[in-house]
Image (cartoon, grey):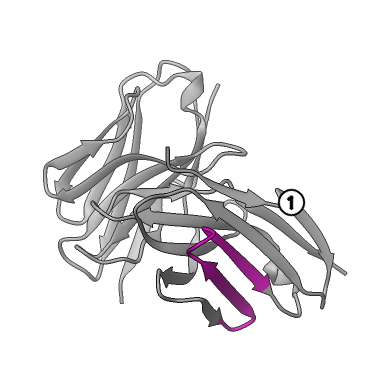
Amino acid sequence: KNQVEQSPQSLIILEGKNCTLQCNYTVSPFSNLRWYKQDTGRGPVSLTIMTFSENTKSNGRYTATLDADTKQSSLHITASQLSDSASYICVVRSTGTASKLTFGTGTRLQVTL
Amino acid sequence: SQTIHQWPATLVQPVGSPLSLECTVEGTSNPNLYWYRQAAGRGLQLLFYSVGIGQISSEVPQNLSASRPQDRQFILSSKKLLLSDSGFYLCAWSPGGGEKLFFGSGTQLSVL
């Protein structure tokens, strides 16, 4: 069964600090992995999409890594800001139809003063 | 540019009442359209997807139905809501054959 597990479930950090969110998956066959940011009560917004051959991809202060061998991904947030407070969702797509996405339950990040 | 509109943002409905959530996409043609539900503490669950007018695929058996009367319009419906239908509903679209998924702003449905 395809699964995506994220950790930690929630995280509180001080503004300006860095943090790393983890994603482990068992989706097969693998197509790509995406990280989304979801503000409370809003729809998710894409941060990065990584394919099998990509190890690292950055989007501003967000850097995603992918280890396809161990089936792990991380999202590193540098110099956090209050606006980074949101849920971060890891999504893995398997090959086949476009509808085959497996969503993680997300990590709830709170950035405080 | 492409935009996706979903409404209403919040809805409170009594058990047994009907439901109609609407989603429209602008600025593109022949999009793939999706309805997801997000329950508290759980990942997004795909409910329906459509690759064209009148073409609806259901991922899970449930009390809901979907329709696509026009190319860029996707409607989620129920004849009689259940308590278990409460949740956060998200409409999304992707270009036909494309990778990226774009979400609407969501509808928080509370069935009381």
Residue at 56 percent of width and 39 percent of height: B42
Which of the chains bears the disc numbered 1?
A: A
Q: Is residue B11 visible?
A: no
Residue with the most extreme bottom position: A60
| Numbered-mark total | 1
| Residue nearer the viewer, B56 or B110 | B56
**Residue type indicated by callout 1:** Ser
Whether residue B80 is in magenta: the answer is no
| Residue nearer the viewer, B36 or A33 | A33
Q: Is residue B88 visible?
A: yes
Res. A72 image quadrant: bottom right
- Identify the element where label 1 is drawn: strand
Residue at 77 percent of width and 74 percent of height: A18
Which residues fall within the magenta stretch?
Answer: A59-76
Whether residue A62 is in magenta: the answer is yes
Q: Please give the residue where the numbered disc 1 appears in the rendered image.
A: A10
Residue at 75 percent of width and 75 percent of height: A80
Residue at 83 percent of width and 73 percent of height: A15
Relative side of B33 to A54, left or right: left
Res. A70 image quadrant: bottom right
Question: Residue B1, position in %: x, y?
Answer: 31, 77
